Image: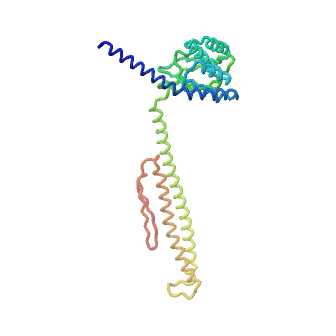
Amino acid sequence: MARLGPLVFALATAVASLSTAASARAENEAPAEALFIEAKRLVAAGDYAAACPKFAESNRLDRAAGTMIHLADCYEKNHQLATAWATYREAASAAKNLGRLDWQRLALARAEALDTKVGRLTIEVTEPADKIEVRRDGVLVSSASWGTPLPLDAGRHTIEATAAGRQPFTTTVTTTDDGVVSRVTIPKLAVAPAEADTREVPAEKASIASSQASQSNQKTWGYVVGGVGLVGLAVGTVAGLVAIEKNADATRVCPNDGVCPSEAAIHDSDTAKTFGTISTIALVAGGAAVVTGLVLVLTSPSSPKHEAKLAPSIGPNTAALSLSGVF
């Protein structure tokens, strides 16, 4: 009896497994049947694009040779000939396992009829790089499939090739039916530029550009400030000339420093003082601006290092501006 223990346990486990599988299948049969009926209704209405996914889901829930034959027929009417061809062959295998030779003969005959109509695609890799990966519509194509015309539904397809250290290759091809074999040749993948180069070169260019921009900005400000200074010198000069002229007019009328009875002479004297003050301020400010502009231009980043000191001085009757340093 001791020896019968493991055998009994194994039988119990098998029975439990079969019971679980049968229960799961029973749960799937109802939705699978509902999807199958709905798919047949859509086929009758000519809506194959909506019917095929329902046949496929019904077959996933409850795999059956009859459902696969209906699914393949739907694919064929929806102009997915390669998928229909493959599904007919799968249905023939399932029918053989069930002992339904009539279904098997039907599925094989339909597959054979499509064999010469199905479009095919050949992918060739001329010089494969190390660990190269080729994908068709995002699905990996093994190296064993390279160079072989493989059935493919008509339409636009994307072919990609990637490898470490290589630039990726991407192309598209439009396949057709009527037995046409399309071809895509993947060339030798170019070596990808080193990551260090892609980082350093732009950084170096950016540094040069930044330096040039800084130099240009400082020089521009130097020219602007210097130009303002020149305008100030011109204003100061004109104001000084006016002050000299008005002072001369007042002196002619009242040559002495005493009280002058002439209102015109008094007005000319006041005007001369006002313009004299304006002249002094404009000359000092203008001179300072000119020198500042000169310093900005001479000390721009591309120029040698310069040091400059600006020292304005204003007295009762004089105005001076001194510049010292190394240029």
- Residue 102 position, x and y percent, is 63, 12
| Residue at position x 67%, y 23% in the image | 79
Task: Identify the residue at the far left of this view.
Answer: 2
Front residue of 119/308: it is 119
Image quarter of residue 241 = bottom right
Front residue of 295/25: it is 25
Q: How many marks?
A: 0
- Residue 280 position, x and y percent, is 50, 70
Colour option used: rainbow
Image quarter of residue 83 = top right
| Residue at position x 69%, y 17% in the image | 178
Task: Say if residue 171 shows up in the picture.
Answer: no
Task: Identify the residue at the far front of this view.
Answer: 1
| Residue at position x 53%, y 20% in the image | 141
Front residue of 212/155: it is 155
Task: Say if residue 31 shows up in the picture.
Answer: yes
| Residue at position x 50%, y 21% in the image | 132
Image quarter of residue 265 = bottom right
Front residue of 276/105: it is 105
- Residue 85 position, x and y percent, is 62, 17
Question: Is 244 drawn above or below residue 80 in the view shown?
Answer: below
- Residue 215 position, x and y percent, is 49, 48
